[in-house]
Image: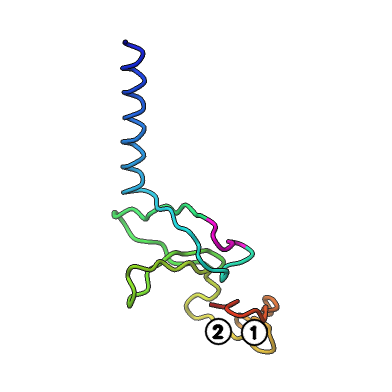
Amino acid sequence: MRTTINYVFWILLSIGIGCIAKHYLISIYRIPSASMEPTVLSNDYILAIKPFPIGQISSPKRGEIWLFKRSSKQDITLIKRIIGIPDDTVTISNNELRINSAFISKISTKKNSLA
């Protein structure tokens, strides 16, 4: 009997900690599109750490992947890689991505590759 109560206690404690973590610390998202391939594939699931309400959110850095909500559609979370930061000049010409005139990479011509 005591062992059963012990198991139930640990199971309920684990569920409680999981619920608290899901609500305050982490979010799980399914990626519906191929816009981030090959880094994140369509229908992948990702786990994102929520920013703490205390303090400032850090500034985006080039190469980081950020999740955010579009102001016009708050129910949709977008995932994008940061390629330009303030004072950068980002250009795409002849399927070449350049940042501050420096060649970065060739751009795929697939539909929605830059979406």
Q: Quadrant of residue 110?
A: bottom right
For mark 2, give the secondary structure: loop
**Contact between labelled residues 2 and 1, with CB atoms less than 8 Å apart:** yes
Question: Which of the labelled discs sits on residue 59, or is there none?
Answer: none
Measure how far apart labels 1 and 2 are at the Cα level.
Answer: 8 Å
Of 64 and 32, nearer the camera is: 32
Give the SS element for disc 1: loop
Q: Crowding near pointer 1: few (<14 within 10 Å), some, many (20+)?
A: few
Residue identifier under label 2: 89
Residue nearer the viewer, 90 or 107: 107
Near-viewer residue (8 or 95): 8
Q: Which residues are magenta?
A: 39-44
Crowding at dot 2, Cα within 10 Å, few <14 / some 14-19 / many 20+, comes out as few
Q: Position of residue 64 (x, y in %)?
A: 53, 64
**Residue 8 at x, y percent in the picture:** 33, 23
Q: Is residue 102 above or below residue 38?
A: below
In the displayed structure image, the side of residue 75 where residue 102 appears, left or right: right
What residue is drawn where x is 36% and y is 32%?
14
Task: Name the residue tied to disc 1.
Answer: 101
Which amino acid is tagged 2?
A: Thr
Image position, residue 33 (x, y; %): 53, 68
Query: Coloring scheme of the render?
Result: rainbow
Is residue 72 one of those drawn in magenta?
Answer: no
Classified by dominant secondary structure, the portion drawn in magenta counts as loop
